Image (spheres, rainbow, N blue to C red):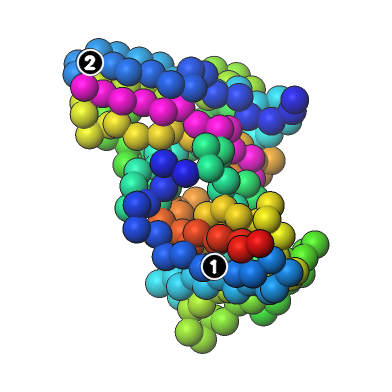
Amino acid sequence: GESVGLHLPTLSVQEGDNSIINCAYSNSASDYFIWYKQESGKGPQFIIDIRSNMDKRQGQRVTVLLNKTVKHLSLQIAATQPGDSAVYFCAEKLKYIFGTGTRLKVLA
Amino acid sequence: NAGVTQTPKFQVLKTGQSMTLQCAQDMNHNSMYWYRQDPGMGLRLIYYSASEGTTDKGEVPNGYNVSRLNKREFSLRLESAAPSQTSVYFCASSEYSRQPQHFGDGTRLSIL
């Protein structure tokens, strides 16, 4: 994890609980978003994507919600597991990845 | 293992030295990308290649050059390294030019 920001917002969640990670964007014309997971010492890993013509998309244990009115994305992880511990961040098309992400810590 | 392979994994350079970071993917993807990741800055796009034979600048291209050698390989070159280029560099690929889907594990570069 030494490659990401030193002052990441951190979300601590009890194992088995649901996690909600939030992301704000600024460009109202943005039409495609991706959520990534980055484990310590690894490159980002694609989790799920969503187009702007959708409000919600579900994957395996993950759901992404898109609120275009307030330019906000959220990633929901159901039944959080220790293996979900990582830094999560959202991205828009070919631009830089928003901010430094959110560190998710899963408590046993 | 299928995926994106970056070499080297670690490198220390002196200011002014040159260096080429190598990247190869075996997924037959059309698009490839180079990012840098710095503390407090997230990931920033340096260059990308939408398809073989094309390259375009990203957000922070100054001080870098790229070569899309063939469909598999996309290299990043630092002609005269500067301490500000100390970072972790990630190569990525995707089937189409929309957003990278597969990343390598990074090259950790320190410039003294």
Res B99 seen here:
no
Tell me if A31 is positioned left or right of B112 in this view.
right
> Considering only vertical position in the picture, is B28 above or below A107?
above
Which numbered disc covers residue B14? Answer: 2
Does the magenta run of residues contain B87? no
Position in image of residue B76 (x %, y %):
42, 24
| Dot 2 amino acid type | Lys
**Residue at the outermost bottom position:** A69
Please state the chain letter of the residue tagged with numbered disc 1 in the rendered image. A
Chain that bears disc 2? B
* Residue type at numbered disc 1: Ser
Q: Is the Cβ of the residue at disc 2 closer than 8 Å to that at disc 1? A: no
Please state the extent of the stretch shown in magenta in the rendering.
B101-112
For label 1, the SS is strand
Describe the element under mark 2 as helix, strand or loop: loop
Q: Which residue is mark 1?
A: A12
Q: Are marks 2 and 1 on the same chain?
A: no
Quadrant position of the C terminus of chain B in the picture: top left
Query: Does B94 appear above or below B9?
Result: below
What label does residue B68 carry, if any? none
Q: Position of residue B50 (x, y in %)?
A: 56, 38
Instruction: Give the left or right position of residue B50, taking residue B10 as reference.
Output: right
Q: Nearer the viewer, residue B24 or A100?
A: A100
Q: What residue appears at the point 46 percent right and 65 percent down from the top-left corner?
A: A10
Q: Residue at (48%, 18%) from the top-left corner?
A: B8
- Count neighbours of disc 2 (C-alpha within 10 A) and say few if under 14, some if 14 to 19, many if 20 or more: few
Give the camera-side residue of A74 and A79. Answer: A79
Closer to the camera in the image, B22 or B29: B22
